[in-house]
Image (cartoon, helix red, strand yellow):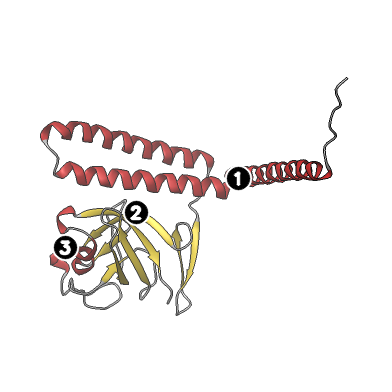
Amino acid sequence: MPMIAKPSALEKAAKAGRLFRMACHRTISIFLIVLLTIFCFTPRGLAVSLEEEKNQLLTTKTSLEATLKGAEPNRKQQLRKEIAEVTKALKELRTKKKKRGLRPVKLSIQSGEGVKTNLAAEPNIVTGVASYYAEKFNGRKTASGAIFSNDLLTAAHMTLPFGTRVRVTSLNTGKSVDVTINDRGPYTPGRMIDLSKAAFSTIDSMSHGIIPATMELLEP
């Protein structure tokens, strides 16, 4: 009868180590799944998820609309169809948020003067659509009282305190520009920020008119 070799102490220790590592990995995986489940199924988690989905759809729609302007005639029909599908998805998303009674996720920002405002976003960075001022606004008084100039690196935002510094990055080119908020706007639905021509031309081609971009709050 053949002799069966008994495992050495070293082999036993190695096996025990492998079992311990497997148990640790399983425990960590379960813990992460539980955390993710809690986050996704809380009102805030759902709101953040839906807000991200909305921003992605808006960015896609803006990119398609920009492509449509210079597209060949045989390509335009397909692009219009894709834009219609994205628009339909945005409407369905709004209906979903309304049914669930979810509010936008708010980031509280404190200005140097103690004025608080809210920005629907994840901390510090928002994705949306950037546009630029028409030339007719050059020389006019802004909501802050300053005289607007398309040659300066300034911008308009609906809620951020005047004097707030933000970094706007074009998702088309990856280029960034730092601007100061000194006006209110844009008033066109779906747009995030209005840039001066000097700021817009720094990050993208003026021929686009509107671009998908991110806006990052900078430290005072």
Q: Mark 2 Cα within 10 Å, few/some/many (few <14, many 20+)?
A: many
Q: Amino acid at mark 3?
A: Ala
Mark 1 to mark 2 CA distance (whole Å): 26 Å
Q: Give me the residue at 47% from left, 68% from top.
A: 109
Picture coordinates of residue 49, whole percent (x, y): 49, 46
The tag earlier along the polypeptide, 1 or 2, is: 1
In the rendered image, the quadrant that contains the N terminus is top right
Q: Amino acid at mark 2?
A: Gly
Q: Which residue is mark 3?
A: 134
The picture places residue 122, in percent across and down from the top left corner, at 48, 57
Give percent across and percent down for residue 40.
Answer: 57, 44
Give the residue number, with chain letter if any, for mark 2.
128
Amino acid type assigned to the residue bearing label 1 in the image? Leu
* Nearer to the camera, 194 or 67: 67
- Is residue 125 rendered to the left or right of residue 29? left
- Helix, strand or loop under label 1: helix
Point out the tag, 1 or 3, that comes first from the N-terminus.
Answer: 1
Q: Nearer the viewer, mark 1 or mark 2?
A: 1
Residue at x 31%, y 70% (from the top left corner)? 178
SS at mark 2 in the image: strand
Sequence-first tag of 2 and 3: 2
Q: Is residue 89 above or below residue 185?
A: above
When the figure is inspected, residue 25 is found, relative to residue 154, above or below; the finding is above
Residue 163 appears at what percent x and percent y? 36, 76
Circle 2 or circle 3, nearest the eye: 2
Q: Mark 1 — residue?
A: 36
Q: Are marks 1 and 2 in contact (CB under 8 Å)?
A: no
Q: Nearer the viewer, mark 1 or mark 3?
A: 1
The residue drawn where x is 75% and y is 41% is 19
Q: Give the residue at the far right of this rendering.
A: 1
